[in-house]
Image: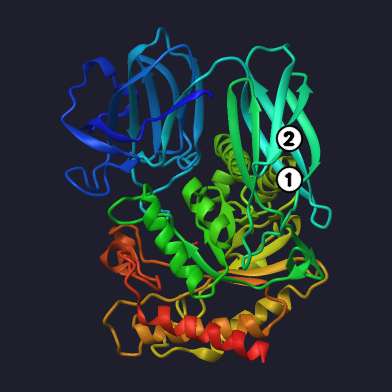
Amino acid sequence: MLHTQSLNGEWEFHFTEKRLSEIDPSKISYECKMPVPGCFDAKGPYRFLRGCGIYRRCVLCGGKVRLKIGAAGLRAKLFWDGKEIGSMVKPFTGESFLFDAGPRKNHELVIATENVFDRSASSLFHPFYDFYAYGGIYRDVSITELTGAFFEYVRVTPLDLDEGTVAIHAEFGGEPGEKKELELCFDGGECERISTDGKTADIVRKVPAHRLWTPETPNLHALHLRIGEDEREIRFGMRKAGIRNGRITLNGKTIKLIGFNRHDAHPDYGYAIPREMTRTDLEMIRAKGYNFIRGCHYPQSEAMLSICDEIGLLVWEESLGWGNSAESLRDPVFIRGQLEQTRQMVRKSVNHPCVILWGFLNEAETHEPCARELVDALVRTIREEDRTRLVTFASNRIFRDVCLDSLDVVSFNTYPGWYGMQDAQQFPEQEVLDALRAIIRFVSDEKYREKGVILSEIGAAALPGDHSGLRWSEEYQAELLKTVLGEIWREDRWSGVAFWHFSDTKTYSDGRAIHRPRGFNNKGLVTEYRVPKLAWKALAEHLKKLKSSAES
Ligand code: ADA
């Protein structure tokens, strides 16, 4: 078996206001320790500072290695024994670096991260995004010593749910040209050996005693693979998402997706939220009967997706974007970044049964005709990698959007009862219902009739302790969410809703903070420390009531 070491733990750390381009790893003195994964600016002495966070540690290894970094932000440079070996420019996108580590001994690894904004149209993470741009090494780091053949990529695709067949696609690295034997077995059963050309393998197999994956029965299978000394265990689930007569289906049956947008973030940890906290969030949501998470607004962590696989939460995963302008949508560097991160996201998450929707470009200027080119290229990129999920993006241009016809599912972010309606202090129930019904009329047009429809964001802010019943109160938020849930439940044309949003989330205290008291987006049903507001219980009870009246 190949030797893989986790490099998570305490690293030496230095903060400087210098730019990444000025960093010379030989001239740094490290003043403290910092956890990896971690966001150096989430708490402690570097909280809210912008500059470079430089991490260093020793690694005992040698020969050909693969260094894997789950995610780093906003960008990073890597140095091995003082020599630059690579860089990362897409926050939330993991990268692997293959290189010769030299003789087997202790080596110095430095990862210099930078959280200074790039404000150009090419940038993937702008300061106007409504979520805080933390710096650091967000996700797991590991290193594997490679000998002989190894896996570069493995995809397991369910083919026929009745027969229980899957298509296995594997890509190998190692010495080119040599034939290699691939060993495979399902769920610890009997192993089979197949000879390959040493580059790729494409095999169709029947999964013994296969069981369907559904939110209620999240049955997982394991495919064990070995080539040379490299072994992989791929967990997968037998399920299929589709569309029939404009309704989303799972395993051939129509399904209503009900759940939340969730930032994979926490005020004390930034985007390096510990696995057990992620689990608590997701189990809290599942336990109240919800079946859906929109992972807003960036590729999700392995931990998040594995837990959703296990507990039966369906996921919309999207690449990083937020309100991007027409200028960005035309910018060649921005376009390349979007296409690359979206392809990498699909390849990273392709074996997770929980993921049924791929998305991108939240609330971009998709009313502009120039947006078409990028939207179409993103749809093509996704379909090149995976044809078994549905493709969507969340539009707030709604009736003016010119990119909807490329999608399987049209999704809308709208805030009736919150934004606009300047005169309303009390919850304007009828206006909210009217706004939702106008969308349903819009999607009944022939152009959209066959597409699924999701309400991808809706909500109202609530400040804990405000019980006035007016805007900003816990009661107002609860009323709005209950009304929306009732309407989504009643109207068959809606395939689902992702309420905005599970928990309050850190954003900025700049000029926009007039709408973001405390520098948080306060539309959470629980606070940033996951303390429930009134809506948390009220909405769950309403859902329970709707479900039981549908059953009786
Ligand atoms: C948008 C956006 C969210 C959040 C929300 C809000 O729809 O997609 O990230 O900013 O509005 O709270 O206004």
Question: For the residue with label 2, is its CB less than 8 Å from the closest atom of ligand 1?
Answer: no
Viewer can see residue 324: no
Asked if residue 388 lies left or right of residue 547, the reply is right
Residue at coordinates 73% horizontally, 72% vertically from top-left? Answer: 443
**Whether label 2 touches label 1, CB < 8 Å:** yes
Q: Outermost residue, front direction?
A: 190
Nearest the viewer among 457 and 441 is 457
Residue 410: image quadrant is bottom right
**Label 1 near ligand 1 (CB < 8 Å):** no
Residue 34 at x, y percent in the picture: 24, 37
- Residue topped by disc 1: 157
Is residue 247 left or right of 472 when viewed as pictured?
Answer: right
Which of the image's four quarters has the C terminus?
Answer: bottom right
Tell me if mark 2 has few (under 14), some (14-19) or many (20+) residues whose alpha carbon lies within 10 angstroms of its own. some
Q: Nearer the viewer, residue 517 or 188?
A: 188
**Which secondary structure, mark 2?**
strand
Identify residue type, mark 2.
His
Which residue is located at x 45 percent, y 22 percent? Answer: 86
Image coordinates for residue 70, horizontal then vertical, percent: 46, 37
Residue 522 seen:
yes
Residue indicated by mark 2: 169
Element carrying mark 1 = strand
Quadrant occupied by the N terminus: top right
- Identify the amino acid type marked 1: Thr
First reached walking from the N terminus: tag 2 or tag 1? 1
Disc number placed over residue 407 in the picture, else none: none
Residue at the outermost top position = 103
